[in-house]
Amino acid sequence: MHVRVLKLGQGRKDVELDSGATLDEAVEASHFNSEGCSLSVNGLDAHSDSTVRENDLVVLTPRVEGGQSRFSEHGSR
């Protein structure tokens, strides 16, 4: 079956999988590194052991974490 895998900021790959394949297998077939990414299938959050279906869109979204605000407590720079 055909599944499209998209990693934001890195590109898209179309992969062919056996029926009943998991999200983890789709990501592995794409050769994208999923470490530090949130996973979704067709716009819905998903777990790596979720089953994917024909023509699904798998999206790997790198997590954005922390940082220091450039603004002071009063909203000025």
Image: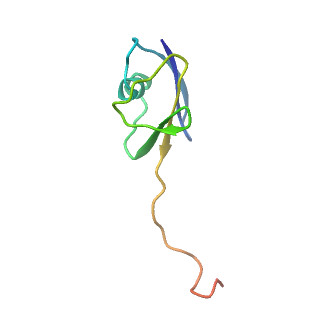
Depth check, front residue: 45 or 5: 45
**57 is higher (above) or lower (below) than 35:** above
Residue 65, percent from left and from top: 45, 60
Residue 11, percent from left and from top: 56, 32
User: Among all residues in the image, which is located at the extreme left?
Assistant: 49
Colour approach in the figure: rainbow
Q: How many marks?
A: 0
User: Among all residues in the image, which is located at the extreme bottom?
Assistant: 74
Residue at image coords 44%, 44%: 38
Residue at image coords 54%, 74%: 69
Quadrant housing residue 9: top right
Residue 73, percent from left and from top: 57, 86
Residue at image coords 56%, 28%: 12
Question: What is the quadrant of the C terminus in the image?
Answer: bottom right
Depth check, front residue: 37 or 54: 54
Going by the image, does 66 lie left or right of 70?
A: left
Residue 31, percent from left and from top: 41, 27
